[in-house]
Each structure stands twice: as C-alpha cells, then as structure tokens.
Image: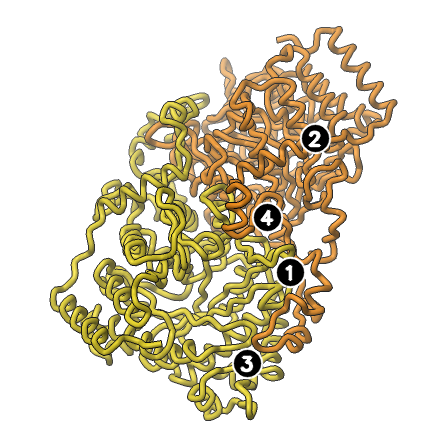
Chain colours: A yellow, B orange
Amino acid sequence: MREAGRDRRARRNAAGGPAQRPWRRVDNHLAPVEPLSADQIEQIHHASLRVLEEIGIEFLHEEARAILKAAGAEPVPGSPLVRLDRGLVLERIAEAPSEVTLHARNPAHNLRIGGNTVNFATVGSAPNAHDRQGGRRPGCHADFLNFVRLGQALNCIHLIGGYPVEPIDLPPATRHLDCLAAFVTLTDKAFHAYSLGHARITDGIEIARIARGISREQLLREPSLFTIVNSNSPLRLDGPMLEGIMAMARAGQLMVLTPFTLAGAMAPATVAGALTLQNAEALAGIAFAQMVRPGAPCAYGGFTSNVDMKSGAPAFGTPEYVQATLAGGQLARRYRLPYRSSNANAANTLDAQAAYESMMSLQAAVMSHANIVLHAAGWMEGGLVASFEKMILDAELIQMLAETVQPIRVDEDTIGLDAIREVGPGGHFFGSAHTLARYETAFYPPLVSDWRNSRQWAEAGEPTAYDRCEKLVAEVLAGFEPPPLDPGIAEELREFVARRKAEGGAPA
Amino acid sequence: MREAGRDRRARRNAAGGPAQRPWRRVDNHLAPVEPLSADQIEQIHHASLRVLEEIGIEFLHEEARAILKAAGAEPVPGSPLVRLDRGLVLERIAEAPSEVTLHARNPAHNLRIGGNTVNFATVGSAPNAHDRQGGRRPGCHADFLNFVRLGQALNCIHLIGGYPVEPIDLPPATRHLDCLAAFVTLTDKAFHAYSLGHARITDGIEIARIARGISREQLLREPSLFTIVNSNSPLRLDGPMLEGIMAMARAGQLMVLTPFTLAGAMAPATVAGALTLQNAEALAGIAFAQMVRPGAPCAYGGFTSNVDMKSGAPAFGTPEYVQATLAGGQLARRYRLPYRSSNANAANTLDAQAAYESMMSLQAAVMSHANIVLHAAGWMEGGLVASFEKMILDAELIQMLAETVQPIRVDEDTIGLDAIREVGPGGHFFGSAHTLARYETAFYPPLVSDWRNSRQWAEAGEPTAYDRCEKLVAEVLAGFEPPPLDPGIAEELREFVARRKAEGGAPA
C-alpha cells in the first residue's frame, strides 16, 4: 500500500545528504509489456536453436570444450566450434533456477532475483569518468571510490554493478583486489566481479565469502556475488569469460549471460534477427553453466540495440532498443529464467537527450520485468563515460518508476466520498481533513525536479536539472559515511588482499 | 510491417525542413497498461455514480438545467445543483459512439478517434510563448501563427489542439475568427474550437463546415471539429462550456469532456479519490451531451495530476500522474468511450527535467491507449508556456513512441538465419547482403538525437539537444509552405470572417 510506507523521516538518508526515498524492494505490480505473440516467440526460439545445431558457437577454451563434449555436445574437430543439439540445450537450461536470492553482507539488502522484482545497479565498466567541474577524464581510483560511495548512499540502488569506472591508475594485476575490497568496505550491498580469467573471479568469490563471514559450503547455497558474462557476438565465448562461468558455477554464484548483439554490427540489422542471435548465445552460455554444475544460478541477459546506419555508431534508447528489451523479457520468461536489462543512452552531455533516451531504456527495462537493471544510474555516451551528475538524475528516474509500478490503493478511505461531499461544488481540498491527514505522505517527493513557478525559478538563478544534480552529488558525497563492518571481517579482508597482492594478484 | 514503410524519400517533409517520419496513423499494437483491477474499476465507478446521485453537480445554465430536468435528472430547487440517477447516467452514456472519424479538410488527414489509434495534438491554451532567442513573453498573433505553422509542418502532429498560445494582441471579440481562419489557411489538419459561449463555438462549427466545403447535413454526419469541455472541478460546469456542449452536440461535432482534477487542490489528495471525481464529472458531461442529442460524439478526458504538497504548485509527469493516466484509459474503456490524455510537464527550461517529465506523461498517454494526446508538443511550465524548441523535442519523443508501438516483423527474412550462417562466429554484419538490403530503412532515424562520439561532438561545439531544437525550429519555419486551399473555400472563409467581424464577433 503506497501511502503506508511514506514516512517523512525515512526520506532522509541515514548517511546524510538529500531527501530521498527509503531503500525498498521494488515489485512491479503492472503486467509486463509484451510486443511479441506466442507464435513469434516460438519462431525466434526455434531459429535460435537451429543456429546452435547447424552453425554452432565457438568456445575458446579446452576444458570448456571437454565439458561440452562429455555432456553430449559436438565439438567440431580442429576448430573451437561446438554444435549443440536442441534437446541437450533445453534439457540443461531447464535445470537453472527460475528465482534466486542474491545475498548482501547486510541481510536487509538481500535481493530477490526473479518474478516481478526489479533491482537497479550502478553503472559498470566505463573507461572514463565525468563530472561537470572536472570534465571528462580516464577512470582513476579516486573517481572509482566516489562512484561506489554514491552507489551506497543512493537508496534506490540495489547492487554495485561492476567497476563504475575503470581505475586505470591501479596496477592491472591487483586492481580487482582493491576494487572488490572497496565494495565490501564502502557498501553493504550485493556486488559484481568480472569474469576476466580464473584468478580474478576466484578472488571475487573469496572476497564475497569473507564479506559475509560464512563458509564455502554456505556460500554455495547462498549466492552472494554476480558476474556478467558477455559473449563476443556473433557466436563466440572467449577463454576468460568461460573461466568465469566455470568458477562461478562451481561456487554456486549468479551468472548473467549477456550477448552484446548490436543490430547491424554484431547481429543482423533487424530486431528479430538480433534477438535470434541473442537468444542462441544466451541459451548456449546458460546450458554450458548447467553442464558445469546443474542448478547453477543464471540470468538471461538482453543487450540488443542498433547502430546508426549512417555512421556505424551504436545507438541506445531507440525504438528498436525498447522493442528488443521488451521482447527479451518475454524470451527469458519463456525459459523461466531471471532477466537482465540496462539503462542505456548515447548522449554526450546531461541534456534533454540524456533524459529521454534513458527514460526510453529504463521504462522498457521496468516494463519488461527485468530483474536486474544494470547501468541503471550514471551511464552515458553509450557506456564510454560514467557521469556523477547522471547518477543523480537516474536516481530520480528510478525512484519515479519504482513508485509508478506500486499498486493504487482503492478503498473507502482513499476514494474519500465524505471529503468530496464536505468540500462540495466549487470548493477546495487543500484544507480538508482528508488532505491534511495525508499532507506529508500523499505524493512522490522529487529529488531533482524543480516545480517552482517561473518567477521564483528566475530569482533562484534559473537552475537547470544539470545544476541541481551537480549540487546533489556534492551533498551526497559530503554526507557519506561507510556502513558498519565487523572488525573481524575487515581484518580477514585486509589479510586476504595483502596475501594475494604479495602473490602477484592476477598476472596477465 | 515496419520495414516496408521506411522510404528515405518519405522522410523529407514536403514543405522542406529536416528529415522526419512521414505522416501516418499510429495504431498502438501493444496492449494497454492497466494498473487497476476490474474490481477497483467497479469501486471507482460506483463511488462516482454516488457522487452524482447524492451530491450532484452544478450546471450553471438555465437551458441546460431544463434539458436535464426533461431527461429525468433532479435539479435542486433554488440552486444550480442537479442530481443524476445512476440509471439515467448509464443509459445516456451508452448512446455515445465508441469510435468516431474526425474529418480534416485534407481527407488524408482524417483521424480515427477510438480503438488503439493514438493521435497527437499541438500544445493548446498557453498564455505565454517562449523561444530561446526571444525569451518568455505574453502570447501574440505572430507567435500564434508560427506555432500553427509548426503544427502543420511536423508530420507526427495529427491535430491542432486549440490556440497553441493565446494571441492577446488580437481583440477578444474577434480573436476566434482570426485564429480559426488561420487553422484553415495554414493547415489541412483537423482542429479545435473553444467552448467559450454560444457565438464562438457556433462560428467554429461554421468555419469547420466552410473549410471542408460541405453542407450542414454532411457536417452533422461527419464530425470535423473538436472542443475540450473542462469542468470547473470540483463538480461544476459553467455557462460558456455548457453552451459549447449544446452547440457541438446539436451539430454532431466531437466533445472531449475533461475535468481538471488536481489531487490535493480541486480533488482529493489520492489517486483513487481524484479519479472518482474525474469520473463523476466526465460522465455527467457526456450524459448531458447525449440528452442534447443522442449519439453525439464524446470522448472521456483524463487530466488528473497532483500538487506539490509543500508549495501547492501543480506537478506533472509524476508517478501519480502516470497512474491516473493509465487508470483513466481503463475507465474510458469501461464505458466504451474514446479517451483523451496529455503530454504534460512542469519544467521551466528545456533541460533533462522537461524531457523526463514529458516522457513519463507521453509514455503513459500512449500506453493508456489515449486516442487524443492533447498538448503533445510544445507544452511547458505546467501549461503556462508554449515553447518552440520544446515542440521539436516533443516531435522526436512522439516519433520514437509511434515507432516503438509498431509490430515487430518476425519471419524468415527478418530472422536472417542465412545471414547469421554467412557471417559466422566472430564476423561482422555491416557488409552482409542482409544488412545492405535494408541499409536505408532498417532503424529509426532521429530528429534531435546526436549520436556522434565525444570527439566529433566537441569539434562541433558541444551542441546540446536545446541547441539542435533551436536550429530545427528555424529550419522548419524557413521551409514552411501552406498546404493548397481551394480558392472558393478561401473566398467563402474570408467573407464569413469579414461579416462576423462587422457584426462585432462574440462580444463579452
């Protein structure tokens, strides 16, 4: 019931900073929007199975091919290609759970990954950072830490979705240790580790275990880490990613199989063709994970967009992107798998385009019933930039959509027939008892939107949304306090990181 | 079929100006989004009928009350209040057609008002105009004419929705004559006339007849004009609006009954309460129109939003606005009536807020299956300003959503299994025959979005969406040519306007 949860005190962030909505699980009470008919879904389903049977997919890893062969797939001799029979694929993906709890070190931040629950993650993997004062620059550790702080401080963010920006001033071999340790010390939310070879992902799994202070056995039962596995579309899974799948499946952690099927570049220049390729690659990866360990938690990732045909530049938040996102949700449900989408845009600055392209993507993600919305806050320039101000703007968008998908309360009290009678024709509800009783909690309070009239707004110096976001970034960071961390866990984490650094980390 | 219609030549506006999508009827192939259960709809339905039965609604017009009384309603003696029995209301509204063709003087621009067809109208009724160079100023005739030209030149605009801006430099008594004549000479699209008393609306009906060169009898069969009838919420219909209903119903023209139920001000501070009041007022107006003339075309208008509880300022594009918009569509379908919504926002400048609030409103309108989206392009500051640049920005939003709701073509050709086979693992689709065959028409070509990479964008001077809209306004206006008009019709129109001016127009 929407009104019930709106306590004004709860709008204040515990760590200081601006009024915002409290942390909450977002269940989407609206039915998913479904552009494809059941027949069309079956057409794409069958075509993608033909791709795996007739063309096959490259697995660039010996051990992976051996596992596939043992499970009944057909490696093509003298080639990395493996052909997968449809019976084998369907049998295996049926073993993946349709819903999983992703555990955080703060149990209040555990997440339901499945059903109608939508979880929003920070931007991940941008090579550059941007804020308005400092401009655009290659990612560094200091910016990385501030993005992670924002990810913790913003209540609407459920997960830390990879490095918000790549800290290239940290040595590559040990970068993952510093970054993962920061996720644990600066946040108490669930987080991501990269599937970039065996050593890195294994360190990630160990850090997730240490963070929760649990045994490997308990970790196996309680997924506490997630990874994005991108196929190299078309039809290729590389060695580091396959090592990620093998380690994560064996440890029982959550994998999100996400082909990057950009229509007109890495995929056919049609929504149907790109979805067919996406589906083939996602199913192949998920089936492989199940061969490694039956029941390993997997999500179906959709990341189909299109290029600008004039320039070849990737475009996001387009009509085709929305259609593919909504259809991807249908495909994931066809296989009873959790679904992952994104909040993507191709804007170069925090202008109207950034807002409308993001709104197209985010609405599609929410209405597709995506369970993980990666890059939900801070992504710009088609993923080349993580923007501090955009992260705040997106928090407003996320909060608004999270509120929109709540049920509307309809009962005697909310209908307020007595209030309508009392106020009568030509009257005003502002002073009525019905209004006064819900004065503080009636409507969504905005984070960024400025509803002052034009005179007041002019007197305030005509601030734009960009100005307000800039101010809020500073406010949130100034008020940041890391969440409490058990000293024993902190010590074990320090020791682990120190030991692994001494061992050389993950050499190239 | 999406691909079929994408002819590059068609992207060029006949009247010059930028590449844009061709005129088309927009059928929304996605199912409407419905936040209320059938039970909740019935609760609101019954509560609103109780409002009309137990409280009643004021009809501030003698003749209207006489008509109501003759039809079986209960005027309260010595008061403008009329109580309406639920049986009477339901019987009458059942007589309104569920779908109507709204005729334009160019038959190619005739509109289906009903079913899953969405029609987009220009901004209407703003007291102020704004463009970036000229700033904010009270509406004038010159600005009025330029907005009307934009409404004609933008292919995605289906109707002229009232005066985009009020031309206060024209004398009030004859203003409507100049404005309506301009709709006919500068556009060949269907248009709106204000229900501001008998004289003005009767002149509007006559000008609509002259524009089409038809008889009154044919006009009666072929609605060619629409009017918005706003009730003065709560529970009051004023004299000028009632004269509008009576004249329009008798002439068989389209009325859109739209209560302005701002939750927390003119309506209860709950979505359910505001919808109940909206529903009561809309049904009362539509029932009354049917009493004047059974079968008179009526649409159900929804315009429920909420105030900012801190300041009392109206807010738009909020979560509550979206919920009320979607629920309004359900109520209209409950009564088998066409539905009207809006593209509303409360932003003071063309920034990210203007874009995300508009996107919230516009998406809700489209997904509610609104048949008329008023204020679809150019509305800002909660309706106090018509903005030239915003009109272009909204055209981009409208074009994108119109494309998004088209069916996805799924067949052997679009799936492109042969292309996937030909390109193979690790290949690239950019040069494939499948891609080249649809190179020109594959994807939505943007009007405003800038997808250049950051270097190219910086070299171009870092233009924002606002800059691009500013440029496009000038381009469209520079290329404007009025559509052809039969000289006989032009002459008849001139004579009518001259005669009515000589008679004094519509004195206050």
Callout 1: chain: B
Mark 1 in CB contact with mark 4 (< 8 angstroms)? no
Q: Earlier in the sequence, mark 2 or mark 1?
A: 1
Q: Look at the image and tell me in which quarter the C terminus of chain A lies.
A: bottom left
SS type, badge 1: loop
Left/right of residue A140 with respect to residue A213 in the rendered view: right
Task: Classify 10 Å Cα crowding around label 2: few (below 14), some (14-19), many (20 and above).
Answer: few
Asked if one can make out residue B281 in the rendered structure from this viewpoint, the answer is no
In the image, what residue type sits under mark 1? Answer: Ile
Task: Classify 10 Å Cα crowding around label 1: few (below 14), some (14-19), many (20 and above).
Answer: many
SS type, badge 3: strand
Q: What is the x, y in percent for residue A500?
A: 23, 75
Same-chain status of marks 3 and 2: no
Q: CA distance from mark 4 to mark 3?
A: 35 Å
- The residue where tag 1 is placed is B408
In the image, what residue type sits under mark 2? Answer: Ala
Q: Quadrant of residue B226?
A: top right
Asked if one can make out residue B320 in the rendered structure from this viewpoint, the answer is yes
Q: Nearer the viewer, mark 1 or mark 3?
A: 3
Q: CA distance from mark 4 to mark 2?
A: 27 Å
SS type, badge 2: helix
Task: Classify 10 Å Cα crowding around label 3: few (below 14), some (14-19), many (20 and above).
Answer: many
In the image, what residue type sits under mark 3? Answer: Ile
Q: Which mark is residue B401?
A: 4
Q: Earlier in the sequence, mark 4 or mark 2?
A: 4
Left/right of residue A430 with respect to residue A349 in the rendered view: left
- The residue where tag 2 is placed is B478
Q: Which mark is residue A276?
A: none
Q: CA distance from mark 3 to mark 2?
A: 54 Å
- Name above or below for residue A49 compared with residue B326: below
